[in-house]
Image (tube, grey):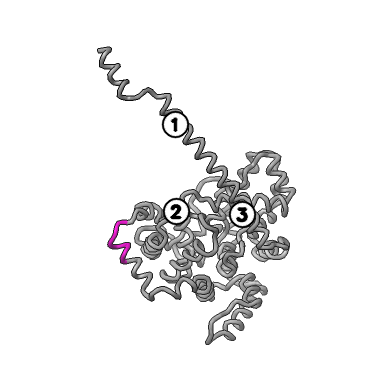
Amino acid sequence: HLSEHEYDIYGFKTLPEEEDEEEKIVAMVRALNLKSLSLTDQEVSVGVKWENFLASTMNREMVPCPELKSLVRSGVPHVHRSKVWRYCVAFHVRKYRDCLADDYYKGLLSLAREKQNPASKQIELDLLRTLPNNKHYSSPSSDGIQKLRNVLLAFSWRNPDIGYCQGLNRLAAIALLYLEEEDAFWCLTAIVEVFMPRDYYTKTLLGSQVDQRVFKDLMSEKLPRLHNHFEQYKVDFSLITFNWFLVVFVDSVVSEILFKIWDSFLYEGPKVIIFRFALALFKCKEEEFLKLQDSMAIFKYLRYFTQTVLDVRKLMNIAFVDMNPFPMRQIQNKRMFHLEKVRLELTELEAIRQTFLRDREISRPDSRTHFSDDEEDN
């Protein structure tokens, strides 16, 4: 059993067991990344600003304002994160919750207990695969597993058209590290129903496919050299970035950075924060990529480079300053454009499939006559 100091404050193992070369590099990086106990001056001043801000809103609700936005972008201190996340989630789902009974979540859970849910089998299979390197989810008896099961089952009853899709487990698990079970359920609801476009998590993953194309466009506009480099070596980075978007960087970046990305993500909601951070991660390591001169090396680096990004302040600065201007309308237009294209392609594929099936039916002799021929031969 690992002793307490072998986990970080979020419950993630700091010493991976993997023997793989890449994993070793990442482990060394993580070891370097373990925060020394003395906070930097900058973190102390951010902490003080948060204390002051929260003291000023002590008896009333936090409301979105420029001060809160810039504080969130500097990262929410661990001690205040539960409170801030709870506020963000409540703000984004208020329009749904206001018209529901107080025991709505409990009702979903009792439904899940009484009725067989088509999603429950897949949910069970995925529980222990969710965050195996986090002590809250590492074994069937870990404190997070039952809560995770509840959140995912309740969600699948609320959204039967999605039911359960791999990726939702990771989103819920991260939410549960800072939120009570019911708030984590609403956090998952906010991400799927408010933040992400439609069909992000449905069977076709249509929304996710569209966003990868939008992201490619943004890469060619914001990081043209790197984009051309990938093109030149025929490296399809969407094989890696697809997952960043689907699970909002869970398992892709060190935990210190992950939670700061989530701070902004939960505060700003549908404002396409993921695109900013995805571009910023590439920008951080652009020079390293450009040095690599063969596609295997590029793809290998692509698989783990995000784990070597450690400077939170630099990343935030690139995401929120260097990547400007970042008009929301432009992203919406790109999404509409690519959605049409992907839909057309899917329709064409379906037509080809139908034609193929029809042709196969025609070219195959009728099975009954086939049998009678056989009988005559005997």
Three-letter code for the amino acid on which mark 2 is drawn = Cys
Q: Is residue 113 covered in magenta?
A: yes
Q: Main secondary structure of the magenta part?
A: helix
User: Start and end of the magenta stretch?
Assistant: 110-116
Residue lying farthest to the right in this orientation = 225
The quadrant holding residue 257 is: bottom right
Q: Is residue 187 visible?
A: yes
User: For numbered disc 1, what is the local secondary structure?
Assistant: helix
Residue designated by label 1: 358
Position of residue 180 measured from the top left corner of the image (x, y, whole percent) = 43, 71
Three-letter code for the amino acid on which mark 1 is drawn = Arg
Q: Which mark is residue 165?
A: 2
Q: Are marks 1 and 3 in contact (CB under 8 Å)?
A: no
Up the image or down, 255 lies above or below 70; here it is above
Distance from Cα at disc 3 to Cα at disc 2: 24 Å
Up the image or down, 2 lies above or below 64; here it is above
Position of residue 351 measured from the top left corner of the image (x, y, whole percent) = 51, 38
Q: Is residue 49 covered in magenta?
A: no
In primary-sequence order, the first of circles 1 and 3 is 3
Quadrant (top left, top right, bottom left, bottom right) of the C terminus: top left
Residue designated by label 3: 336
Which numbered mark, 2 or 1, is in the foreground of this view? 1
Which numbered mark, 3 or 2, is in the foreground of this view? 3
Position of residue 326 measured from the top left corner of the image (x, y, whole percent) = 69, 62
Q: Measuring 43% from the left and 24% from the top, which residue is drawn there?
A: 363
Which numbered mark, 1 or 3, is in the foreground of this view? 1
Three-letter code for the amino acid on which mark 3 is drawn = Met
Q: Measuring 54% from the left and 76% from the top, which residue is drawn there?
A: 80
Q: Residues within 10 Å of mark 2 (few under 14, many from 20)?
A: some
Q: Measuring 72% from the left and 46% from the top, which residue is drawn there?
A: 290
